[in-house]
């Protein structure tokens, strides 16, 4: 077998192993988010208190992504991938120690700390997996990079959607502690298997990597990062607290059985949304006819589709405002379900375009740096969106929550409109 064929086989095997590890991680990540949200809502936490539970998770994503690019460049992508999986296991183990007799302040602080560790874990795994695609994708095949990153990102989100459903189901069946323990044990088994079977194909790192290299001088990387920040802020402004709590309020009658039914229904909707989002992401290269388009055209698509996205939460906010009546649930809930599923389709196209463009704009020699910086912006957007989700829903209900999402999407449109259609990349190491 030729050296080229051997290299391709090893590269594909490494890609499969990285994807499998990422799938396992995101399954537990999605389940944990739904477990925490629904469990603490039933304990009487307000929307703002619920958003606090996720703030450190998102903040640590900012810190982690800023430094993880440098760590991966120095110590290698497999090291950061294993570290992410191991840290998630420790976070799940810690969460089993939560005592329901603790005061609210203590419970919030404890869960925030554990979620912060989980945030570090997630972004170590995420940065490692996304960076690996740039290195492993066959460069000689047109459109291969877009397809490979779309498959990884799309499948990851589909798996995370299953995690939302899994989390809600486990909460209803075995309770909070049992669910967290089961996920931690399963993830430990998967980490051991991946560590034993991981083939070669990923770089081991370089000792001379400097932390200052994390900050890009490429205007396209910086503008795309800003557009990413507001894109994910627009999603999480309604996704994290507002919509799940609204649906739970509408669907539950307050009884134990009513709560259990509402858990399944809310978890099912969130799972369907994420799974559908993942499938659209994976299909984006085909839907957007990426094989027939150059980089300049794809930059134009990123601008167009975020403009379309902005219209959806604006229309839903208007519907929520008009539906502010004593009994709006039936028609408004149906409108929200349809509108948010449409939001998911358009959001997935935007997200897939961004995920391709960051790898297209960067060079292989500094891919972990630029990807880390880009996902730092992603985490910052989730942080802002998470906080605004709780604050806006508590202050202005569903209408303000959705209007905030529309504003964040409009800001993403502004920065996407500033992307240059030709690459202006700084020299390596800049």
Image: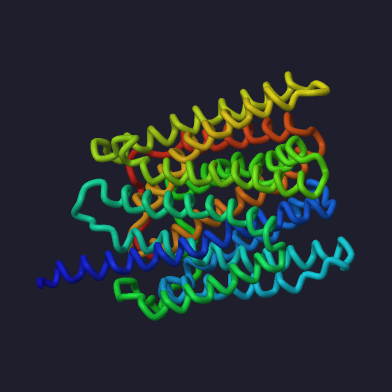
* The N terminus: image quadrant: bottom left
> Could you say which is closer to the camera, residue 293 or residue 347?
347
User: Does residue 248 appear to the left or right of 342 in the view shown?
Assistant: right
Total marks shown come to: 0
Identified at 83% across, 66% down, the residue is 100
Left or right of 391 on screen, residue 376: left
- Residue under the image location 39 percent in, 61 percent down: 367
x and y, in percent, of residue 361 in the image: 36, 50
Classify 409 as above or below 14.
Answer: above
- Determine the residue positioned at 31% across, 63% down: 135
x and y percentages locating residue 7 in the rendered image: 20, 69
* Residue 336 quadrant: top right
User: Which residue reaches farthest top?
Assistant: 322
Relative to 250, is 221 on the left or the right?
left
* Quadrant where the image shows the C terminus: bottom left
The chosen color scheme is rainbow
Give the residue displayed 54% in from the left and 63% down from the top.
Answer: 123
Residue 281 placement (x, y as % from top left): 42, 44
Depth order, front residue of 93/268 = 268
Residue 178 quadrant: bottom right
Residue 255 appears at what percent x and percent y?
82, 46
Residue in the foreground of this view, choosing between 176 and 214: 176
């Amino acid at each position: 077998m030729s050296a080229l064929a051997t290299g391709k086989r090893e590269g594909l095997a490494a890609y499969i192993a990285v994807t499998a590890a990422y799938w396992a991680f995101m399954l537990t990540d999605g389940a944990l988010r739904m477990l925490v949200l629904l469990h603490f809502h039933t304990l009487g936490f307000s929307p703002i208190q619920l958003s606090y539970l996720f703030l450190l998770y998102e903040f640590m994503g900012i810190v982690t992504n800023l430094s993880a690019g440098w760590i991966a460049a120095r110590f290698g992508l497999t090291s950061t991938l294993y570290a992410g999986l191991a840290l998630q296991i420790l976070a799940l183990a810690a969460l089993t120690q939560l005592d329901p007799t603790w005061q609210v302040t203590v419970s919030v602080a404890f869960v925030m700390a554990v979620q912060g560790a989980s945030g570090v874990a997630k972004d170590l795994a995420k940065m490692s997996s996304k960076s690996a695609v740039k290195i492993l994708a066959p460069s000689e095949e047109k459109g291969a990079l877009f397809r490979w990153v779309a498959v990884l990102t799309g499948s990851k989100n589909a798996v995370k959607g299953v995690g939302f459903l899994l989390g809600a189901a486990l909460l209803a069946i075995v309770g909070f502690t049992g669910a967290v323990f089961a996920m931690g044990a399963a993830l430990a088994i998967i980490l051991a298997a991946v560590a034993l079977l991981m083939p070669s194909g990923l770089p081991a790192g370089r000792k001379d990597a400097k932390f200052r290299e994390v900050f890009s001088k490429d205007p396209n990387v910086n503008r795309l990062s800003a557009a990413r920040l507001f894109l994910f802020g627009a999603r999480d402004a309604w996704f994290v607290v507002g919509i799940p709590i609204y649906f739970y309020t509408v669907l539950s009658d307050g009884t134990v059985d009513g709560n259990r039914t509402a858990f399944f229904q809310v978890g099912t909707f969130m799972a369907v949304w994420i799974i559908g989002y993942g499938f659209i992401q994976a299909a984006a290269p085909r839907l957007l006819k990426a094989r027939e388009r150059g980089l300049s055209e794809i930059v134009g698509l990123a601008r167009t589709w975020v403009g379309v996205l902005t219209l959806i939460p604006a229309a839903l906010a208007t519907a929520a405002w008009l539906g502010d009546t004593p009994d709006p649930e039936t028609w408004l809930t149906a409108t929200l379900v349809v509108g948010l599923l449409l939001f998911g389709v358009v959001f997935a196209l935007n997200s897939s375009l961004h995920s391709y463009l960051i790898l297209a704009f960067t060079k292989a020699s500094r891919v972990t740096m630029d990807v880390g910086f880009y996902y730092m912006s992603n985490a910052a957007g989730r942080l802002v969106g998470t906080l605004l989700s709780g604050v806006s829903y508590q202050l202005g209900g569903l209408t303000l929550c959705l209007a905030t999402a529309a504003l964040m999407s409009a800001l993403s449109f502004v920065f996407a409109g500033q992307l240059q259609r030709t690459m202006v990349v700084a020299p390596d190491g800049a």
